[in-house]
């Protein structure tokens, strides 16, 4: 099992960039394929935390048994909503993208906020 975690002092755009860089580095270090999907899901979770939940507090990555769990803890207890998707809308695609790419996703309470997680199939490069 592989684990990586990044705590954010500030939940701002810089934190999102640092989180995405952390994901890219972990995927490279662990030699995993499908890195683009995982990076996109992480970016969406981090961005949603920034836009809707007071910013990200922590990013954690766990890889075991061919599954990568990406989890972002934020400052709001309100869960994300998967609404009706409109392909022609500007914005509002984050949860839809996560739902389409992840094997499963969900939320759990975390202190005064929550953690949103997504599991993706991730196998080693051949």
Image: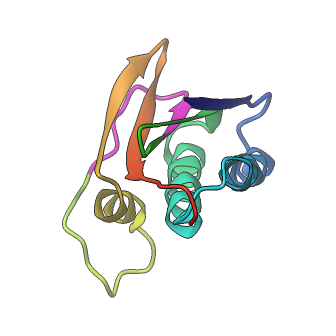
Q: How is the image coloured?
A: rainbow
Say left or right for 89 vs 59.
left
Stretch of the chain drawn in magenta: 69-81
The percent position of residue 40, horizontal first and vertical second, equals 54, 64
Say left or right for 102 vs 9.
left
Count of marks, rendered view: 0
The percent position of residue 124, horizontal first and vertical second, equals 55, 56
Q: Residue furthest front?
A: 126
Q: Is residue 97 above or below residue 68?
A: below
**Which residue corresponds to the image point at 35% horizontal and 24% vertical from the top-left?**
108
Q: Is residue 60 above or below residue 87?
A: above
Q: Nearer the viewer, residue 84 or 116?
A: 116
Q: Tell me the quarter of the picture where residue 62 sits.
A: top right
Q: Residue furthest left?
A: 84
Which image quadrant: the N terminus? top right
Q: Is residue 118 above or below residue 38?
A: above
Q: Nearer the viewer, residue 59 or 66?
A: 66
**Which residue corresponds to the image point at 76% horizontal and 44% vertical from the top-left?**
15
Q: Nearer the viewer, residue 74 or 103?
A: 103
The percent position of residue 75, horizontal first and vertical second, equals 55, 27
The percent position of residue 69, horizontal first and vertical second, equals 46, 39
**Which residue corresponds to the image point at 38% horizontal and 65% vertical from the top-left?**
97
Q: Tell me the quarter of the picture where residue 126 sits.
A: bottom right
Q: Residue furthest top?
A: 111
Q: Nearer the viewer, residue 33 or 126?
A: 126
Indicate yes or no whether the magenta region holds residue 71: yes
Q: Tell me the quarter of the picture where residue 106 sits.
A: top left
């Amino acid at each position: 099992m592989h684990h990586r975690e990044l705590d954010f002092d500030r939940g701002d755009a810089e934190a999102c960039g640092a989180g995405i860089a952390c994901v890219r580095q972990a995927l490279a270090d662990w030699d995993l394929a499908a890195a683009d999907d995982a990076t996109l899901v992480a970016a969406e979770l981090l961005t949603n935390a920034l836009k809707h939940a007071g910013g990200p507090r922590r990013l954690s990555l766990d890889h075991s048994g061919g599954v990568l769990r990406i989890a972002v803890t934020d400052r709001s207890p309100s869960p994300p909503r998967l609404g009706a998707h409109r392909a022609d809308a500007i914005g509002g695609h984050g949860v839809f993208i996560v739902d389409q790419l992840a094997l499963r996703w969900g939320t759990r309470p975390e202190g005064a906020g929550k953690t949103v997680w997504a599991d993706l199939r991730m196998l080693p490069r051949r």
